Image: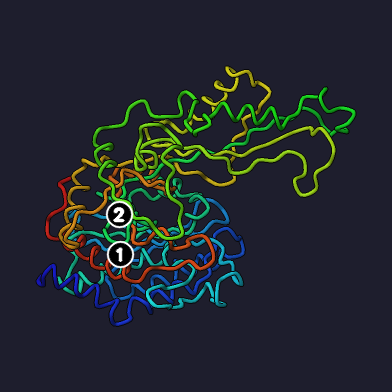
């Protein structure tokens, strides 16, 4: 064993500078791993069985292809390097699937399945969500092995292919292959961070619950001149029912939807979050939502509810008729302080108490929704990784108690019983999920250095004791 921490960081960033990282990223992006499309299953398998293992060839990892217990769903690649069972084991997460490529809708004729450079912007589907990010973790492992001659810890690289559709089969796979996946900590790379100028550490995710509200009064619409004013109007009934859920300023009124208590460690971390205003993105309205809470508290420590869609009649061709039904779809995002399974029963009780028993609440299960999760900001692994990032970047990272978006943190926490940490290397303007998804190249290079520093420090004995 030899080398230095600085040498490992320099070696990782040299993989960016000499084009190795970009070459490997091109190979990953070229595979159209759209998990929403059943006919892409062979591409999901090829990514896990051939392409990604090919990128990792020569790194001393044993490759496993873990079949999904759900028929028709993509597999998982598990690459394991066990140097000594007595050493700490890190489970490193990424997802190889992407959302639809939307070919033909990208600007300047760009191909979603090729990496196109435009200055500091690297365009391509998966450049940030998530191929470019789990590649950072892999290339940083490569650099540490080259510098030290070993990792100094055990690493298991876990890349699934269903995250964009809610990770179907993931829990069953983890229960089936629990012995293979045993680890001391989970470290994933995904999502955007709050700023482009400081690193970030996220500790879980808010959960999501979606449902329809429906008012179904009759099978047919009836002439507005003959029946208007004498037949109940489902559109108005639904509007009044929805108006009881939040105040005109967006404060949630449903009992059981907001936290009764938020841990002090979470509040402390939330108060210290630094944001960056990104051109072209909206600013937070201080008059919307829970009074007295800051922007960061509303996003990371509280509950939100939004209307995804609402309809009555035929908006594309309105008719002069009293409609028979109205429907809206809502989504609640909640922290671990609000049980996800209590959201719909709480709403049912609220609507009944407000005089709207005729409004149905219909759960939506179009995709597996992630539950809420949160690693305590005071956990020793958080302190160790945050300290490593600060040492590399010469500034402390943003520590986010839980992501505002969705990820499968809760499954790993519940099935493996380990702390979950996320290190994002993208930014809010990256257009993930839309045309023109792109990486900000300097963040990729910075991420390689940050991850090499973390891997080096874990291998140097800085990891918390089991």
Name the residue located 77 percent from the left edge and 40 percent from the top edge.
313
Name the residue located 19 percent from the left edge and 65 percent from the top edge.
151
Q: Are marks 2 and 1 in contact (CB under 8 Å)?
A: yes
Where residue 95 appears, as percent x and y from the top left, is: 43, 59
- Residue receiving disc 2: 187
Q: Is residue 203 visible?
A: yes
For label 1, the crowd category at 10 Å Cα-Cα, with few meaning under 14, some 14 to 19 and many 20 or more, is many
Where residue 108 appears, as percent x and y from the top left, is: 55, 77
Helix, strand or loop at label 2? It is: strand
Q: CA distance from mark 2 to mark 1?
A: 9 Å
For label 2, the crowd category at 10 Å Cα-Cα, with few meaning under 14, some 14 to 19 and many 20 or more, is many
User: Based on the displayed image, in which of its 4 quarters is residue 76 positioned?
Assistant: bottom left
Task: Answer with mark 2 or mark 1, whichever residue precedes in sequence.
Answer: 1
Name the residue located 46 percent from the left edge and 68 percent from the top edge.
47
Give above or below for 18 relative to 78.
Answer: below
Which scheme is used to colour this image of the protein? rainbow
Where residue 57 appears, as percent x and y from the top left, is: 33, 75
Give above or below for 394 relative to 359.
Answer: below
The N terminus, quarter of image: bottom left
Where residue 382 appears, as percent x and y from the top left, is: 22, 47
Q: Is residue 180 visible?
A: no
Of residues 106 and 188, which is closer to you in this image? Answer: 106
Helix, strand or loop at label 1? It is: helix
- Residue receiving disc 1: 137
The C terminus, quarter of image: top left
Q: Is residue 329 left or right of residue 136?
A: right
Of residues 287 and 203, which is closer to you in this image? Answer: 287
- As drawn, the label of residue 80 is none
Q: How many marks?
A: 2
Q: Is residue 295 left or right of residue 321?
A: left
Of residues 4 and 306, which is closer to you in this image? Answer: 306
């Amino acid at each position: 064993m030899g080398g230095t921490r600085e040498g490992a960081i320099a070696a990782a960033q040299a993989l960016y500078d000499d084009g190795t990282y970009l070459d490997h990223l091109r190979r990953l992006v070229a595979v159209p791993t759209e998990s929403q499309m059943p006919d892409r299953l062979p591409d999901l398998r090829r990514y896990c069985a051939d392409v990604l293992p090919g990128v990792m060839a020569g790194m001393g990892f044993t490759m496993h292809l873990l079949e999904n217990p759900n028929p028709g769903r993509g597999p998982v690649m598990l690459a394991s390097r066990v140097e000594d069972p007595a050493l700490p084991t890190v489970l490193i997460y990424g997802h190889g699937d992407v959302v639809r490529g939307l070919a033909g809708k990208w600007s300047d004729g760009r191909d979603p399945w090729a990496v196109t450079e435009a200055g500091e912007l690297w365009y391509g589907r998966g450049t940030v969500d998530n191929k470019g990010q789990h590649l950072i973790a892999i290339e940083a492992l490569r650099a540490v092995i080259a510098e030290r001659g070993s990792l100094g810890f055990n690493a298991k690289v876990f890349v699934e292919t269903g995250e964009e559709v809610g990770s179907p089969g993931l829990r069953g796979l983890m229960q089936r292959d629990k012995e293979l996946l045993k680890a001391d900590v989970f470290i994933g790379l995904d999502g955007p961070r709050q700023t482009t100028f400081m690193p970030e550490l996220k500790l879980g995710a808010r959960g999501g619950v979606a449902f329809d509200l429906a008012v179904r009064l009759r099978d047919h619409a009836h002439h507005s001149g003959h029946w208007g004013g004498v037949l109940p109007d489902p559109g108005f009934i639904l509007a009044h029912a929805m108006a009881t859920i939040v105040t005109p300023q967006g404060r949630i009124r449903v009992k059981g939807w907001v936290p009764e208590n938020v841990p002090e460690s979470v509040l402390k971390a939330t108060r210290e979050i630094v944001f960056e205003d990104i051109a072209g993105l909206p600013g937070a309205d201080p008059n919307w939502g829970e009074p007295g809470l800051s922007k960061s508290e509303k996003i990371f420590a509280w509950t939100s509810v939004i209307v995804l869609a609402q309809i009555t009649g035929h908006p594309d061709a309105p008719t002069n008729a009293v409609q028979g039904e109205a429907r809206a779809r809502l989504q609640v995002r909640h922290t671990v302080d609000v049980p996800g399974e209590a959201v719909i029963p709480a709403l049912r009780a609220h609507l009944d108490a407000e005089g709207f028993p005729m409004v149905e609440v219909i759960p939506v299960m179009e995709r597996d929704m992630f539950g809420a999760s949160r690693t305590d900001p005071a956990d020793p692994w958080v302190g160790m990784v945050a300290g490593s990032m600060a040492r590399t970047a010469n500034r402390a990272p943003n520590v986010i108690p839980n992501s505002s978006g969705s990820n499968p943190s809760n499954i790993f926490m519940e099935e493996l019983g380990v702390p979950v940490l996320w290190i994002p290397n993208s930014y809010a303007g990256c257009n993930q999920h839309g045309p023109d998804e792109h990486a900000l190249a300097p963040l990729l290079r910075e991420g390689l250095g940050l991850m090499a520093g973390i891997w080096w420090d874990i291998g140097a004995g800085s990891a918390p004791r089991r």
